[in-house]
Amino acid sequence: PAVAAPVPAPPAPKPPENPASATGTAPVKPPAGVSAAGAPSPTSAPATKPTAAPTAPAPPSAAKPSVKPAPSSPSGGGAARDLLVKGLYPEAAKTFAQEARGASFAWTVNIEVACQSETVAKGFQASAGDASFFILPYDLHGRDCYVVLWGRYADRAAAEAALRSLPDFFKTGASPRVVSWASIKK
């Protein structure tokens, strides 16, 4: 018996020499693994859907937990914080004092008395903008200065915890201590 020879597939139509000029548009490139005629490319592997690699949960942060001021804190934003950021220390100190009037916190951390703007600027920079850093006006024998404070706390234990977690900058050049808010308001 005679076996019929396989019939070759008809050749794919030839694309024009310059496809952009034939259609007026840029040529369209077929997807990977497909020939210009639309048939699978004999040299390409079948397309597989990529699978996402499993992700491991992120390790817990190694950062120290921060002690937040009492909810009644006079700062953390607002006009006084904006003035402090701008380096307008006399205005910032007065505005922090106004914001603190009537607040219901009892304790704070007294870092130091600063009489030079550069000292306040260095402290604010060392605080990395932490809302716990604030200043109040302070009269030192007729000289306009600032008392530099850290946080406003409802109880002494919270203020003590804040004192222990102060940035090292404040522990090296000063002798910060926990004080009652009443002693500051004088």
Image (spheres, rainbow, N blue to C red):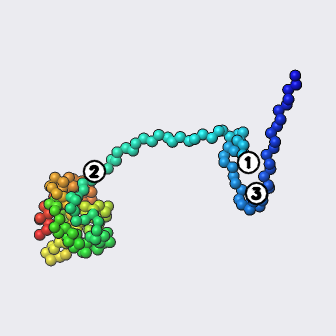
- Secondary-structure class at tag 1: loop
On-image quarter of the N terminus:
top right
Q: Could you tell which of marks 1 and 3 lies nearer the N-terminus?
A: 3
On-image quarter of the C terminus:
bottom left
The residue sitting at the front extreme is 1
Residue 153: image quadrant is bottom left
Is 143 above or below relative to 166? below
The amino acid beneath tag 1 is: Ala
- Estimate the x, y position of residue 16 in percent, counting from the top left: 79, 55
Residue appearing at x 69%, y 45% in the figure: 34
The residue sitting at the bottom extreme is 142
- Estimate the x, y position of residue 64 in percent, counting from the top left: 29, 50
Count residues near mark 1 (Cα–Cα under 10 Å), then give few for <14, some for 14-19, many for 20+. Answer: some
**Residue topped by disc 1:** 36
Front position among marks 2 and 1: 1
**Residue topped by disc 3:** 19
- Secondary-structure class at tag 3: helix
- Estimate the x, y position of residue 10 in percent, counting from the top left: 81, 42
The amino acid beneath tag 2 is: Pro
For the question of whether residue 21 can be seen, the reply is yes
The residue sitting at the right extreme is 2
Count residues near mark 3 (Cα–Cα under 10 Å), then give few for <14, some for 14-19, many for 20+. Answer: few
Q: Which of 109 and 126 is in front in this view?
A: 109
Front position among marks 3 and 2: 3
The residue sitting at the top extreme is 1
Q: Could you tell which of marks 2 and 1 lies nearer the N-terminus?
A: 1
**Residue topped by disc 2:** 65
Q: How far apart are marks 3 and 2 (CA)?
A: 64 Å
The amino acid beneath tag 3 is: Pro
Q: Is residue 145 left or right of residue 31?
A: left
